Structures are given as structure tokens and as C-alpha cells.
Amino acid sequence: MKQFGAKPLTREEQEEANRLSAIAARMGTDPTAIIGRAQALYRSDALQGGSRTNNLVARLDVPYHGNFLLRADLPHGWSNPNQPDTSNQNGLSDLFVRAGGRGSSVPGDAIFAGIGLHLPDGG
């Protein structure tokens, strides 16, 4: 009978996989790694009629106890409508908070479950 899924690794293969996974986590290239970080993400969109919108999102990831993560995204948006008699818009947008944990992990794969909380800005 053919076995499905990942085949068991030898002790040497497992040690090498763990070593490479640790290096990838430190370098930020392992998407399954739970690491702390602060990021700024920027996006600018050109709209019809010469208008522009800009968004800057501040993201903070805080790991705790190795397998849990708290993430907060706080966006700030501003626009330049480039139209006569129209004002610019500027301000904070909706806050998004996510908490979750990694349930299972092998090098290259992980199961993560969490909950997200969306707090609208009321605007």
C-alpha cells in the first residue's frame, strides 16, 4: 500500500531541516516562522481625473511563548483629489488586530489558527 504525505526523515535529515529552518526564520524567508517585526507598507494609486490616494500601514508583530503571535495593523490614508473646490482627506483608518497560534509545525509547513478583530474608524 502506498503511503501518502511526507515520508519520515532520518535523524541526519531532520537535523539538517531544523538547521535550515532556523536560518530561514532568522533571515525572514520562512513564512511559517513566528518572529517579531515592525513593518511599514506603502501604496499609492493613481485614479481617474488626476486624483491620487495613498496608504501607509504600520504593522507590528509580537511573538509570545514561541508559538503565539499578536499582530496589529494601523493604516493611515490620505488623498489628493486634484479637483477644484475639493479638499484633501487625511487620517487614520480601520485598526485590525489578529491573535493566533501555531498548532503544528514541520520544516516548511505549519498549521496556524487565530482570530481577527476589525475596529472601524467610524468615518
Image: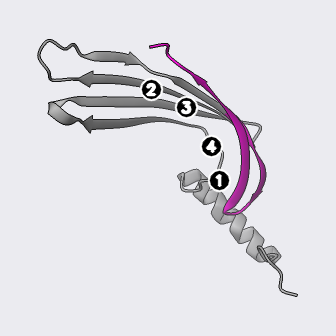
The residue labelled by disc 2 is 75
In this rendering, the answer to whether 19 lies above or below 115 is: below
The residue labelled by disc 1 is 32
Disc with the residue nearer the chain's start (1 vs 3): 1
Indicate the secondary structure of the residue bearing disc 3.
Answer: strand
Disc with the residue nearer the chain's start (1 vs 2): 1
- Pointer 3: residues within 10 angstroms few (<14), some, or many (20+)? some
Q: Which mark is residue 60?
A: 3
Mark pair 1, 4: CA separation? 9 Å
Quadrant the N terminus occupies: bottom right
Q: Residue at x 40, y 23 (%)?
A: 76
Point out residue 41 in the picture as x, y percentages from the top left corner. Answer: 41, 37
Closest to the observer: 9 or 88? 88
The magenta segment: 99-123
- Pointer 2: residues within 10 angstroms few (<14), some, or many (20+)? some
**33 displayed left or right of 40:** right
**93 displayed left or right of 17:** left
In this rendering, the answer to whether 81 lies above or below 4 is: above
- Pointer 4: residues within 10 angstroms few (<14), some, or many (20+)? some
Mark pair 1, 2: CA separation? 25 Å
The residue labelled by disc 4 is 35
Disc with the residue nearer the chain's start (4 vs 2): 4
Three-letter amino acid code at the position of disc 3: Leu
**56 displayed left or right of 70:** left
Q: Main secondary structure of the magenta part?
A: strand
User: In front: mark 4 or mark 2?
Assistant: 2
Marks 4 and 3 in Cβ contact (< 8 Å): no
Mark pair 1, 3: CA separation? 17 Å
User: In front: mark 1 or mark 4?
Assistant: 1
